[in-house]
């Protein structure tokens, strides 16, 4: 029963729609209509407040009915940030695309910790005019009941008191640090690195010296090119460096890269005035044993009143791989080709450690798009779906689709062709529709532990957009 109510409550935190079921007209323009393309980057409380205040201004400018339709557009709704509104008795006002109908009441809904969110939001806005309400709620990104931070303000709805708000899933909190979602093998981009270091700081402060042993031995904290380092921020003495253990006990002020960047001093400079930040330099990648450009996220932490630096680094991929859309947003052949080539680069760098990313990171899996990896006997090394998942260790090169196509053999042959890559068409189950459809997969050849593998992904004809 809780999950049904929770599902319904999730949608009240969706972008707004009032009673009208008509198609939304073009949104009226106000000074606050410039959110499109940036909502997913709202992470701070100040940004959240500004977003809700802009929504209130928009309501005053165009009225509730028009604003409700406008809130349904991308200018105001970009997963996972959106506008919601409720009357003072807990009755929903804004809830598009959900099973929440205008008039549904959430007064008695509780979160997993026993909080009544709607009651608390009413109390805060009634007595203080505005404020934050904290709860735990299902995060559509992680699928878990993560901490959710809402900011609500009192507004007038046709002469009645109501509250208007929006919510974010905060990154820098121990409540988001489950090892199931925060671990070294899932660090791929800047947001991952920042959350990884924040969670490591919580672990360090809670476990003291034991944490240093964990950082160097527990696969949660060290995987391939991702590891943690800790140093005294005053003396720059290297206390621990899990990925480069030869640096432990050395003077970080003497560490200079091939371009003359004084790495320790640059970290000290940034953290002298900022709580966290990035430093950029060239450094050895322990996964490849080659020098690579590195962007390290560093954080100032206090241990027994003394400042230390805790950090991790991202070995910078090509511009094409840095700018990949999320898997769920890939809808044309050009994007899919780059997606697969970047997956091949990850296999080259991390080997089997890349599997965790392919199976669990939103950059690599979402909607009907996912990476698959097979060996030269067509045996599955990475495959996320239950459909046709291999049982046992037998060769799968004789697998045929409904039209008789030897799809695995064709994919293997394409990966071994002179070009080393190419397209193969076959019939396959679309996880989004649960129907067997024509699929076009792009495949590239790669090497894993000295053996040939092929790495690919596909687009279904029903969802493929024209390139351009």
Image (cartoon, helix red, strand yellow):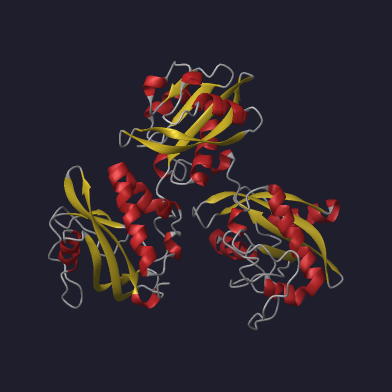
Q: Is residue 221 above or below residue 181?
A: above
The percent coordinates of residue 117 (x first, y second) are 69, 55
Left or right of 350 on screen, residue 89:
right
Rendered-image quadrant of the N terminus: bottom right
Q: Which residue is found at the position 39% from the left and 70% from the top?
A: 332
Task: Give the image quarter of residue 298.
Answer: top right
The percent coordinates of residue 322 (x first, y second) are 44, 51
Q: Is residue 177 visible?
A: no
Task: Give the image quarter of residue 163.
Answer: bottom right
Rendered-image quadrant of the C terminus: bottom left
Most foreground residue, 80 or 256: 256
Instruction: Report the number of discs.
Output: 0
Q: Is residue 284 above or below residue 11?
A: above
Q: Is residue 463 above or below residue 360?
A: below
Left or right of 94 on screen, residue 243:
left
The percent coordinates of residue 323 (x first, y second) are 46, 55
Left or right of 69 on screen, residue 195:
left
Task: Give the image quarter of residue 89.
Answer: bottom right
Most foreground residue, 177 or 423: 423
Q: Is residue 165 visible?
A: yes
Q: Residue furthest right?
A: 159
Q: Which residue is found at the position 82% from the left and 63% from the top?
A: 155
Left or right of 263 on screen, residue 6:
right
């Amino acid at each position: 029963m809780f999950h049904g109510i929770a599902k319904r409550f999730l949608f009240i935190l969706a972008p707004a729609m009032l009673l009208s079921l008509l198609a939304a007209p073009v949104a009226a323009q106000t000074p606050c209509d410039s959110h499109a393309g940036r909502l997913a980057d709202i992470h701070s409380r100040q940004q959240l407040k500004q977003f809700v205040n802009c929504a209130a201004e928009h309501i005053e400018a165009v009225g509730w009915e028009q604003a409700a339709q406008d809130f349904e557009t991308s200018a105001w709704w970009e997963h996972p940030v959106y506008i919601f509104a409720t009357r003072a008795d807990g009755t929903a006002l804004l809830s598009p695309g959900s099973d929440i109908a205008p008039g549904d009441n959430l007064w008695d809904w509780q979160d997993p910790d026993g909080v009544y969110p709607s009651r608390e939001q009413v109390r805060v806005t009634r007595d203080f005019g505005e404020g934050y309400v904290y709860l735990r709620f299902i995060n559509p990104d992680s699928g878990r009941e993560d901490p959710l931070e809402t900011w609500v303000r009192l507004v007038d709805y046709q002469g009645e008191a109501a509250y208007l708000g929006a919510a974010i899933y905060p990154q820098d909190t121990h409540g988001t640090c489950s090892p199931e979602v925060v671990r070294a093998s899932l660090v791929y981009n800047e947001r991952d690195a920042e959350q990884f270091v924040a969670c490591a700081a919580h672990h360090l402060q809670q476990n003291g010296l034991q944490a240093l042993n964990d950082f160097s031995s527990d696969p949660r904290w060290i995987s391939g090119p991702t590891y943690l380092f800790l140093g005294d921020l005053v003396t720059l003495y290297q206390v621990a460096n899990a990925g480069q253990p030869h640096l432990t006990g050395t003077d970080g002020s003497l560490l200079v890269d091939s371009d003359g960047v004084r790495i320790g001093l640059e970290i000290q400079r940034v953290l002298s005035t900022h709580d966290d930040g990035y430093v950029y330099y060239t450094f050895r990648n322990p996964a490849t044993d080659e020098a690579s450009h590195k962007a390290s996220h560093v954080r100032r932490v206090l241990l027994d009143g003394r400042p230390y630096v805790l950090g991790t680094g991202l070995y910078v991929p090509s511009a094409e791989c840095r700018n990949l859309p999320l898997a769920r947003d890939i809808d044309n052949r050009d994007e899919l080709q780059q997606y697969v080539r970047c997956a091949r680069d990850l296999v080259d760098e991390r080997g089997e450690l890349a599997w965790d990313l392919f199976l669990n990171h939103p950059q690599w899996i979402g909607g009907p798009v996912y990476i698959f990896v097979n060996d030269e006997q067509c045996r599955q090394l990475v495959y996320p779906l239950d459909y046709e998942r291999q049982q046992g260790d037998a060769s799968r090169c004789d697998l045929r689709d409904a039209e008789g196509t030897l799809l695995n053999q064709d994919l293997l042959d394409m990966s071994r062709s002179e070009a080393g890559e190419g397209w193969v068409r076959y019939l396959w189950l679309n996880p989004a529709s649960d129907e067997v459809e024509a699929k076009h997969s792009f495949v590239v050849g790669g090497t894993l532990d000295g053996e040939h593998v092929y790495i690919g992904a596909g687009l279904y004809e029903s969802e493929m957009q024209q390139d351009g």
